[in-house]
């Protein structure tokens, strides 16, 4: 993780990951057999990192910012090898040399003019090798296609150009057209949008463009013709939600929250630019949406998989893919006859998708490996290499721990059908237990009915209105979830908070009558029934109407809370 919001992620061909954040910090990570290892940390710029580029051979990395400087790093040695001071504010940066070239050419555009400058990163000079006005307006995005030694660039108006890095001229021998009117390269301009990112397939035959209109366009490089257009607009997302397709449908509350995040992203200037990348076969397109990260088969034109759909608290934006260093001996295929059947069946490579998310300090890794059970169950999947922000530390801080010592760890519910003894977990979820026990002491739950009873699932109460729409916390507002690795819906008689979506807890709670693992990380588990299970089962079996409300009221008479 970083100390500020992560805005850039990149993967080097030499098995290194790079991440940049809003505070100008750059971090290097080394890919290991399983997972990654933190390698080095640089304060690259005083302001936010506005561009991060990796060379095709994976050996050089560069960053730009509005401080008019370019920092160049030797990836393998974790060292800053050069710094270029510019007489202008840079717009974008891209490495434009092939493996084995004598010059390590780097292209830098001006933010306020249409000029593009080519520098040699190894000669230590602040003077460009060549400069030219490639576009009519400021260049916004550049991407190098190493297979055809050509740069694809786009300006602020959405006009796309091809040019050779050595001459900054049109690559006549590399493409099958002479006039752009014979191509679909004016598509962005016709749709009155702009280019956010450009990504080139490993074989160089295709490139993808993402735009603010939420459409992902895939072009053939040599002809400039449009191959695919994927519409990820909010209107399409709403139609998919209404269609009821199990692959795309979310819970109504969760979908509404995600839509609100999408609208917030549109208003945020420094949000990471979402991109659409290709896998090493150039057959799959991978990009982030509000549903999660989609993997689309370009040949069949179908969604093969959606990653991270259940991760409702993160909106992934920029992604990078690692599929193994193809030049490394350790990833070469072993002939099937030579494989020892007793050896591990784990793959020699660990394909990993590196992501950053909206307003998040963390980086996220998707892998085919099953997550390991940590020694400390309280940590879960999280790995902290930085001190988390104050709001994340609150629950685990010494102050927070001191506050939990005065919270009760058990209560007794006296109902019209008998007593239910509950064990609480104030250390794991202090805010939830404080809210619940304070309501208990104040008589808030007295004479409230179990308004929702579903046989083979759960019994729910805590609503003064008695219809599932009421109730509030002791603070008069909704409060956040407190998920804990050791507290799961993995058994019956689990006591958990009811909510209307992430971080919308109030006063309602429920007791499960079976294991309900699909509720993990959606509802806060804060207690277990330790005595009176027969009472819970008796309540579960009462007759209910179509709305799951018992015909005869079952009430909480009062709740006994031990003195702290």
Image (tube, grey):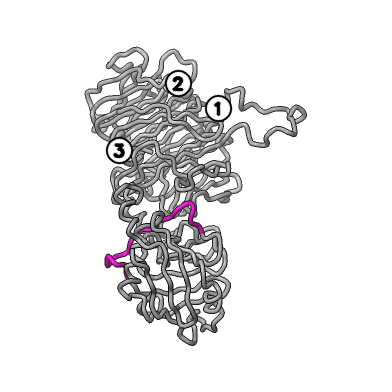
Q: Is residue 184 visible?
A: no
Q: Identify which residue, 78 or 71, lies in the foreground.
A: 78
Element marked by disc 2: loop
Element marked by disc 1: loop
Q: Residue furthest right?
A: 337
Mark 2 highlights which residue? Answer: 76
At horizontal 40% and vertical 39% (from top left) the residue drawn is 384
Image height of 69 relative to 218, above or below: above
**Answer yes or no: do the residues labelled 2 and 3 have beta carbons within 8 Å?**
no
Q: Is 482 one of the magenta-colored residues?
A: yes
Q: Is 64 one of the magenta-colored residues?
A: no
Task: Find the distance from the CA under tag 1 to the CA under tag 2.
Answer: 13 Å
Which image quadrant for residue 1?
A: top left
The tag on residue 325 is 1
Q: Is residue 98 left or right of residue 120?
A: right
Q: What are the residue bounds of the magenta stretch? A: 472-488
């Amino acid at each position: 993780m970083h100390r500020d919001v992560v805005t850039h992620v990149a993967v080097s061909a030499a098995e290194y990951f790079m991440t940049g954040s809003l505070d100008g910090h750059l971090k290097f990570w080394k890919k290991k057999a399983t997972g990654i290892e933190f390698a080095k940390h640089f304060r690259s710029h005083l302001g936010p990192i506005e561009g991060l580029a990796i060379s095709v051979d994976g050996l050089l990395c560069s960053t730009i910012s509005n401080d008019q400087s370019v920092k160049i790093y030797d990836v393998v040695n974790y060292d800053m090898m050069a710094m270029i001071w510019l007489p202008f504010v840079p717009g974008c940066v891209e490495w434009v040399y092939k493996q084995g070239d004598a010059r390590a050419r780097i292209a830098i555009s001006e933010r306020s003019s249409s000029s593009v400058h080519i520098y040699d990163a190894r000669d230590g000079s602040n003077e460009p090798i060549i400069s030219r006005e490639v576009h009519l307006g400021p260049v916004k995005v550049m991407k190098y296609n190493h297979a055809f030694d050509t740069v694809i660039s786009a300006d602020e108006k959405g006009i796309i150009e091809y040019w050779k890095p050595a001459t900054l001229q049109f690559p006549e021998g590399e493409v099958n057209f002479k006039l752009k009117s014979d191509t679909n390269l004016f598509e962005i301009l016709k749709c009155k949008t702009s280019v956010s990112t450009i990504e080139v397939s490993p074989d160089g035959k295709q490139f993808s463009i993402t735009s603010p209109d939420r459409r992902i366009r895939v072009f053939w490089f040599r002809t400039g013709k449009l191959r695919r257009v994927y519409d990820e607009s909010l209107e399409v997302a709403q139609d998919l939600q209404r269609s009821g397709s199990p692959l795309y449908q979310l819970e109504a509350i969760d979908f509404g929250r995600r839509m609100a995040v999408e609208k917030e992203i549109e208003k945020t200037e420094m949000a990471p630019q979402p991109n659409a990348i290709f896998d090493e076969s150039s057959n799959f397109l991978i990009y982030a949406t509000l549903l999660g990260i989609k993997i689309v088969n370009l040949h069949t034109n179908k969604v093969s998989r959606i990653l991270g759909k259940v991760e409702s608290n993160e909106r992934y934006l920029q992604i990078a893919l690692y599929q193994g260093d193809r030049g490394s001996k350790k990833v070469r295929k072993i002939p099937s006859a030579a494989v020892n059947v007793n050896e591990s069946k784990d793959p020699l490579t660990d394909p990993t998708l590196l992501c950053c998310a909206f307003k998040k300090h963390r980086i996220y890794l998707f892998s085919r490996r099953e997550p390991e059970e940590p020694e400390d169950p309280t940590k879960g999947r999280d790995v902290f290499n930085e001190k988390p922000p104050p709001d994340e530390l609150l629950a685990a801080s010494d102050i927070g721990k001191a506050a939990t010592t005065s919270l009760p760890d058990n209560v007794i519910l006296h109902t019209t059908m008998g007593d239910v003894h509950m064990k609480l977990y104030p250390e794991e979820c202090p805010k939830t237990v404080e809210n619940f026990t304070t309501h208990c002491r104040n008589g808030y739950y007295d004479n409230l009915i179990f308004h929702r009873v579903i046989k083979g699932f759960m019994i729910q109460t805590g609503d003064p209105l008695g219809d599932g729409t009421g109730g509030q916390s002791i603070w008069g507002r909704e409060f956040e979830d407190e998920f804990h690795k050791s507290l799961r819906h993995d058994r019956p008689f689990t006591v958990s908070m009811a909510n209307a979506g992430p971080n919308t807890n109030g006063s309602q709670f429920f007791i499960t009558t079976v294991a309900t693992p699909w509720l993990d990380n959606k509802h806060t588990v804060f207690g277990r029934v330790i005595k009176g299970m027969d009472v819970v089962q008796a309540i579960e079996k009462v007759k209910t109407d179509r709305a799951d409300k018992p015909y005869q009221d079952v009430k909480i008479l009062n709740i006994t809370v031990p003195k702290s």
